[in-house]
Image (tube, coloured by chain):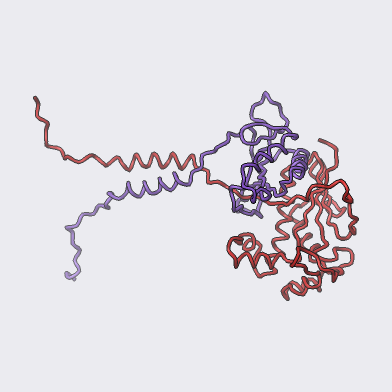
Chain colours: A red, B purple
Amino acid sequence: MAKSKNRGSEEVNAGSMADIAFLLLIFFLVTTQIATNKGLTLLLPPKQEEDEPIEIKQQQRNIFKIQVNSLDRLLVEDEPLDDVSQIRDMVYDFVLNFGSPSQVKKGKKGKEVSEVETYNSLPASMKSYISRSLGSSESSDGPASAIVSVKADRGSSYEIFISILDELNAAYNKIYGERVGLTDEEFRKLNRNDPREKALYDEARLGIPKAISIAEPTKSGE
Amino acid sequence: MSKFKKKSESSQDIPTAALPDIIFMLLFFFMVTTVLRETELKVEQRIPRAEQLVKLEKKKLVSYIYVGKPKDKALGDEPLIQTNDVFIGIDGIVQWVNTEKDQLSEVERDQITISMKVDKETKMGIIVDIQTELREANARKIMYSAPTKAEDN
């Protein structure tokens, strides 16, 4: 029997361990998709009851109309618009217009505020901006009555709809953020599980509901 | 200054004995964070990007709807709706939402969030139809899922 040569070392050769680990690592790197649970949220209106009045007449000045046709062309407040990114500033001005803020308290139970109170709670920089360049009688009465209505044709693309919705959310986040002294990005990243940040979030949103309405579409060009 | 003369006896090699450990650590990180896709996508998904994204906290409450052109060309060009692993029609949405709601505990049932993953070439018509059905099914929280816009603007 040939005696095994005892010249080499007795240890297992671990030099290639790193290579094996690398191979596995690269496999997982390539196959991993870190789950993205991000998106634009929207709250749909409740189901229509039969006996409810179908439409409550809103003052035209309290509705900010955005219409999209089947060629993805925009009509904003009955004027054609080419650049989607302009909507952000227009909606910002529209919501904060405070044309004739009402004294009537609105909102969730126990948290009712009137538009006058909302105005008084705004920081000085926003107040001065409003009194300087807004407050027109042609635009919204106040944030609680302001509604942004998006009416997209059935043939318009989802892509343009998302970019509009993105701009609308940007406008609202800018308002909310400015109200509590944050940028819109900081406001967006508030963690609502943290009581302190939740309080800040609620304070920012109090009296300014995010009223985005997706209207029933027109039917052409599908 | 001979006092600070470099000792040349020590070896110049970087010790590589800990390298496998480091790599293993990375490996475990990726193994733990990896979520293998549980549903096979049967529709095209090129989701438009957006900026003002909100993160959803409770993952358990989220159900997914995929909308897009079918990958299988035999099924035609019209966008279809996929939930879990099957195509459903517009009229099947209410039923689907109810089965999803049944999987949640009673308290959470009204907080169900529907995440819509929609291909960018889809027309708005089908989206609005889905929304109408979701209202009917009393699943009012919806989210248009979208990846972050690249920071190049």
Q: Residue at the front extreme?
A: B106
Compared with A44, B130 (above or below) is above
Which residue occupies 41% across, 42% down?
A: A25
Q: Along the horizontal axis of the image, is A175 left or right of A131?
A: left
Q: Quadrant of the C terminus of chain A?
A: top right
Residue A212: image location, x then y, percent: 77, 54
Which residue occupies 55% across, 46% down?
A: A35
Residue A51: image location, x then y, percent: 88, 48
Compared with B28, A137 (above or below) is below
Compared with B93, A47 (above or below) is below
Q: Along the horizontal axis of the image, is B110 left or right of B13?
A: right
Which residue occupies 60% across, 65% down?
A: A195
Residue A38: image location, x then y, percent: 62, 50
As rendered, which of B104 and B7 lies closer to the eye?
B104
How many labels, in total?
0
Quadrant hosting residue A105: bottom right
Which residue occupies 76% across, 38% down?
A: B126
Q: Along the horizontal axis of the image, is B140 left or right of B151?
A: right
Compared with B8, B126 (above or below) is above
